[in-house]
Image: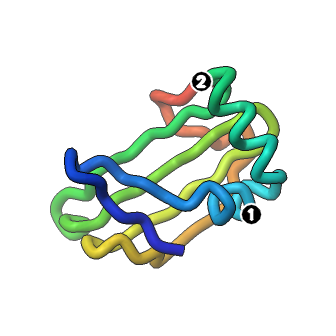
């Protein structure tokens, strides 16, 4: 999986890939996005993690977190339960 940035520097991702990471159908992910049920938190690394980004995505039934290097390559990932979500995401 790879994240790219658009012209404004915002992360973008293929919805099919993200749906697979969340373990849900792409149609469900798209519908939940339209309904406002998809929440994303991006935390930029500091210190030893400078250049990395931690991306957390939550929808109604699933949550996923990945760590990306400065070029947007996924270097670490895990699925999360609602109790594991970081502050800043809707529980």
- Residue appearing at x 68%, y 21% in the figure: 35
Residue depth check, mark 1 versus mark 2: number of the one nearer the observer: 1
User: Height in image: 46 above or below 72?
Assistant: above
30 relative to 56 in the view: left or right: right
- Residue appearing at x 46%, y 28% in the figure: 88
Disc sitting over residue 90 in the figure: 2
Kindly state the secondary structure of the residue where label 2 is placed: loop
Of residues 81 and 58, the one drawn nearer to the viewer in this rendering: 58
The picture places residue 26, in percent across and down from the top left corner, at 76, 52
Total numbered labels placed on residues in the image: 2
The picture places residue 54, in percent across and down from the top left corner, at 41, 56
* Label 2 crowd (10 A; few <14 / some 14-19 / many >=20): some
User: Height in image: 89 above or below 12?
Assistant: above
Disc sitting over residue 76 in the figure: none
The picture places residue 1, in percent across and down from the top left corner, at 54, 74
The picture places residue 4, in percent across and down from the top left corner, at 36, 64
On the image, numbered disc 1 is attached to which residue? 20
Colour scheme in the image?
A: rainbow
Marks 1 and 2, Cα distance to the nearest angstrom?
21 Å
Kindly state the secondary structure of the residue where label 1 is placed: helix
| Quadrant of the drawing holding the C terminus | top right
Q: Earlier in the sequence, mark 1 or mark 2?
A: 1
Of residues 61 and 32, the one drawn nearer to the viewer in this rendering: 32
Of residues 30 and 24, the one drawn nearer to the viewer in this rendering: 30
- Residue appearing at x 68%, y 61% in the figure: 16
62 relative to 6 in the view: left or right: right
* Label 1 crowd (10 A; few <14 / some 14-19 / many >=20): few
61 relative to 78 in the view: left or right: right
User: Height in image: 3 above or below 29?
Assistant: below
Q: Are marks 1 and 2 in contact (CB under 8 Å)?
A: no
- Residue appearing at x 82%, y 52% in the figure: 24
């Amino acid at each position: 999986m790879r994240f790219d940035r658009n012209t404004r520097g915002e992360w973008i991702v293929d919805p099919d890939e993200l749906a697979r990471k969340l373990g849900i159908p792409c149609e469900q992910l798209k519908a939940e996005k339209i309904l406002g049920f998809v929440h994303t938190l991006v935390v930029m690394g500091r210190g030893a993690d400078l250049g990395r980004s931690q991306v957390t995505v939550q929808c109604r039934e699933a949550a996923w977190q990945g760590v990306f290097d400065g070029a947007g390559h996924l270097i670490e990932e895990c699925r999360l339960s609602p109790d594991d979500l970081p502050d800043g995401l809707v529980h």
